Image: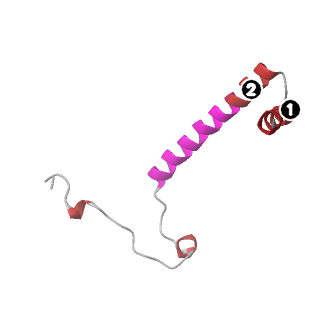
């Protein structure tokens, strides 16, 4: 085992009843949430860019693109 990684270096939160974490006053892991929210924002920006590129390529809005995809899939 790597000496830099010891069992004491892992910290697990205690097991709790379902939904209990939403009602306790325990603080949130703000650093982890910030990273997740940053990733969600960047993925949303990519999705919006893909929608704009699809509209530019096909000349159709989102509903028109969905209709084109259904026509393509169904034959």
Where's the N terminus, which quadrant? bottom left
Task: Please identify the quarter of the rendering in which residue 70 is found.
Answer: top right
Which residue is located at x 52 percent, y 47 percent? 36
Where's residue 51, x and y in %?
Answer: 73, 30
Q: Is residue 7 highlighted in magenta?
A: no
Which residue is located at x 48 percent, y 54 percent? 30
Query: Element at badge 2?
Result: helix
Q: Name the residue that disc number 2 marks.
A: 54
Where's the C terminus, which quadrant? top right
Distance CA(mark 2)–CA(mark 1):
10 Å
Give, as a single range, the part of the protein colored magenta.
30-49
Q: Is residue 34 highlighted in magenta?
A: yes
Q: Is residue 2 left or right of residue 37?
A: left
Which residue is located at x 74 percent, y 26 percent? 54
Q: Name the residue that disc number 1 marks.
A: 64
From this view, report whether residue 33 is shown above or below residue 62. Answer: below
Mark 2 / mark 1, whichever is N-terminal? 2
Where's residue 41, x and y in %?
Answer: 60, 40
Q: Is residue 34 left or right of residue 44?
A: left
User: Mark 1 packing: few (<14 Cα in 10 Å), some, or many (20+)?
Assistant: few
């Amino acid at each position: 085992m790597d000496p830099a990684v010891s069992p004491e270096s892992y910290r697990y939160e205690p097991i709790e009843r379902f939904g209990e974490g939403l009602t306790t006053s325990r603080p949130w892991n703000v650093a982890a949430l910030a990273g997740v929210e940053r990733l969600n924002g960047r993925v949303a920006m990519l999705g919006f860019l893909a929608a704009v590129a699809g509209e530019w390529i096909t000349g159709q809005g989102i509903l028109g693109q969905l209709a084109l995809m259904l026509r393509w899939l169904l034959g």
